[in-house]
Structure formats: C-alpha cells, structure tokens
Image (spheres, helix red, strand yellow):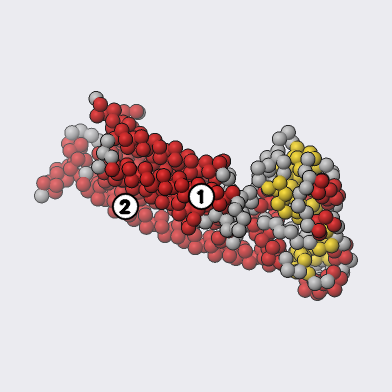
Amino acid sequence: MVSELRSTINSVKSRAFHSSCLITATALLSFMLFSGIVIDRSLNNGMKNMDRRLGADLMIVPKGAKEKAENLILEGQRGTFYFDGSVDDRIREVEGIKEVTAQCFLKSLSADCCSSEVELVFYDPETDFIVGPWIAENYSNSIGPDSVIVGSDIVCENGTIKLFGKEYKVLSSMAKTGTALDTSVYFPSDAMPAVLADAEAKSSFLTEEQKDGDILSSVFVNIEDGYDTSKVIEKCRQKVGDVDVVYLKQLNESLSDNLLKITDVLEFVLIAGTVLIFVILVLINSVIINDRKQEIALSRILGRSKKKICNALIKETGCISLFGSFIGCGLGALIVIPFGRYIGMKLDMPYLGPGAAASVIQLTVIMIIVFLISLFSSLFVVIKTTNIEPYLALKKEAE
Amino acid sequence: MKNRLISSLIFILAGLFTILAPTVLFPVCESEMKMSCYYTKQAEIGVGLLIIALGIVSVLFSSSKVRLGISIAQFFNAILVLAFPLKLTGLCKMSEMACRAGTLPALIVISVLLLIAAGVNAGYLATAGKNDGK
C-alpha cells in the first residue's frame, strides 16, 4: 500500500509541469466551490437568523433614529437613541395594536470579564416577544434582576458575569447571530435603575438621558389582523408625537429579494466556473495521456493489464485532485472565513459564517466533489487510451 | 537561483502587502483620537519594511545557509505580523469597526501565507543543505 502510494507520488512528481497544471486547475475549482458555497450558506444562515429576530410588524424609534434602527436589524449594531419610558404604555392604548414590547440599549460599556466591550439590552420579560423566543431555545424559566442572558461571544467563568463591580448569574447563552448581538448582555427592565447606579458609581460615562433612567430605545409592535397599518401608525403618532417607524416585514422582504439576486448570481458563476474548469481538466488530461501513449503501450507489452494501468492513472488523478483541492479549500477558508463580517458589511446583508464543524464537513464534501470531477474529466481519455492496441500506439508514436 | 528569486519575490510582496493592508487596502479606523489600531498600523509598517529588507538581502546572497537564516527570520516575522493586532498593540474593541472587519482578516491572510512560504522555504533549504553535505 505504502509502496503503491510512493510510486504514484513519484509518477506525479516526474511530470512536474503537467501535474502542476492539473493541481492549479483543481485548486482553482476547489477555491471557487468552497468560497462560493461558504458565502452562499452564510448569507442564507444570516437571513434565516434575521427572520427569527424579526418577530414584530413594526419597530417604533425616536425621530431621526431610523437609520440606526435599520443598522441594528441588519448588523446588530446598536445606537444610543431614546424616548421617554411611557411611550410603550401610550402605544398600547391605540386601537388595532395587538402586542407591544419595549427595549432599551446602553452602548459600549466595558465588562470586567471581557476583553471587548459589551452592549447592555434591557427588555421586559412579561410583554416580550422579540428576545424571548430566541432565548427559550436554551432557557425557559423567568429571569430575575440579578440574572442575565448573554450573547454567544461572551465567555463567562463559573456561570457569572461581572459588570460594574457586581456579579450577575448567567442563565443562558444565546445562539450565534453573526452580529453585534453576540456581544450583548440582556437584563430584565427591572434591573435598569440598579445597573445604571452601579455604572455611575464605577465612573462609567452616562449621558443625561441615561442618568434619568426612565427611557426606552425602541418599541416593537404587532398589529391586529384586519387593521390598516398606516392608520394605526397615524394614531400612534397622534398619541406619542413624531416618531420614526421601521417596517420590519417590508425590510425583511426587500432583503430576501436582494439575497435571492445575490445567490442566483453566485450559483450561476459557480456552475459556469465548474463547467469551464471541467473542460480545462479534460483538455489537460487529453494532452497528458496523449504524451504518455508510448509509456502505456510499453506497459501493456510488458504484461500489465488494462485494469492495472487504469487503476494507476486513476490513483494519480486522485492524488493530484486531493492535493489541489486541499490547497484550494485551504486558501478559500483562509480568505473567506476571516473576511466574513467584511463581506456581510459590503453586501449590506446579514451574514453568519459557518462554525468549525460545518467548515470541516463542507471541506470534505468539496474534496469529494473535486475528486469526482477530476475523475470524470480523465476517465474517458484513460479508457480510450488503454483500449488502443499497443502496436498501433507505438507505431503512431514512431511516425 | 530559481528558488532564490521566487522566495525573495514572495518575501518582498508579503512585506509590501503588510504595509499596504492597514494603510491603503483595508485602512484602520479613521479618527482624530489615536486608537489602538493606529499603533498597530505603525507597527505593521515597520514589520513590513523589515520583511522587504530581508527579502532584498535574500536575493543578494547565494549561500543557502544565509537564506535559511533569512527564511527562519521571516517565519518569526510572520508571527509578529499577527501578534501586533492580536496581542501587542491590539485593535478597536467593537467587532464591526473597520480595523476588525477588514484590516485584521487581511493581516491574517498575509501572515499565514508568509508563515507557509517561509516554513516551506526553510525546510527546502535545510534538506538541500543536508543533501549537499552528503
């Protein structure tokens, strides 16, 4: 077995130029497939995650904070925008409103536990329908004032997190979203006065609005069936003054359309690229096998069976495709995985990169696909050449 | 000669990209205040120049032992390229900032490629040296 492998590698090495052409082609194919599939899946995962995050019809934010609110939805990037703490109660009174829940964000406060800054989110567990279903995956009990729920990037020792000198019990860690939500800490809204007092005591910078304490950043609203959304919004504006409204469902639909366009283009490029490289592989293999006709004919004359020759050639193809796909996938992983957030930001789309296990599975699958493509690209030429009569092959070579 | 030229070219290109990544290709965060990433950029310019200088020196010397030494030095320079943003000088803390989203991935790619190139070249030169010794 080892000696067979060694002879295959020696055979590949002895035709350095041809082998490097094949390795380059398979590496290109693997790079393209790996990068394309990872980007495609990450965009789809990001979209699915966003679908689950948007559990409301509308998001009402203070006037002028619409762009920040959309950034929050797309990238999880929170801003500090506030209106007074009674807005949710006033909106609840409006006719046609089915559900209302409010959240308050405190941005960029350093946690004693973490090397990076964390963002604090206060939500009302009683009325919540945004964070709750998301947390319920890991945790189903109610949250107390001394306990928190943390994003997936926050690493806590012994199940606690220290914020402004006080330790909080971590009830659950949320699933990864690929956005800044992963570095957020979720508190029940009852805990807000105590947390703000602790923050002030520890000399953290707080704005006047934050010091006031009775504030909200956004109100999420679900509208009763049969009511006209624009009329309900008008009534809300009459009740609470001029506010900005983010239409979550519309935003979601428009993002889904964009995603569909991007993935369509990506899939077309992948298919076209694969066909093109397949043709190139067939051409290279034809040239190589043509050059080796004499060698194959001599092997036949010396008594090697067709099957053995076929096996040896297929092993060489396997060896080359394995090496090429390893280089291609490695390069793809090196570029696409670290640049995940950058790609998401440039496309203005939610992007959730694959985990380690998913990456390994994708790598294995792509290596198998590339091996099969390489095999098919050489199979026809190999069979055709090994079927030629040795005498004829040698005669043609002599001519 | 071929190995000398190819390896030196790779080193010079890696050095060039180490300088260009935080300054032109994926610039660090722009701010009036000097943040951590600003110092990382300055440090990377220094390391990049060092990598280029060693790459140029590598072309000038035909001795495989000197070039082996240079390759080993480049291997550690590659580690240094990544050590500045990750440990020594650091980057901004928010994950969506330009230095974390663009500069860091670019430096990861350059560092890993330089690490592989320097390691493979060092291995090749060491093996070639051994064979010559025989």
According to the picture, the residue beneath numbered tag 2 turns out to be A282
Residue A396 point in image, percent of width and height: 14, 48
Q: Residue at x 85, y 69 (%)?
A: A240
Q: Please report, as a chain letter, where disc 2 is located.
A: A
- Do the residues under discs 2 and 1 have CB atoms within 8 angstroms? no
Judging depth in this view, the residue of A280 and A296 nearest the camera is: A280
According to the picture, the residue beneath numbered tag 1 turns out to be B42
Residue A69 point in image, percent of width and height: 71, 62
Q: Residue at x 53, y 48 (%)?
A: B40
Judging from the image, what secondary structure is the residue with disc 2 in?
helix
Q: Residue furthest left?
A: A399
Q: Is residue A343 above or below residue B8?
A: below
| Quarter holding residue A229 | bottom right
Q: Is residue B80 above or below residue A271?
A: above
Q: Label for residue A27?
A: none
Residue A227 point in image, percent of width and height: 81, 71
Please state if A368 lies on the left or on the right of A107 as rendered. Answer: left
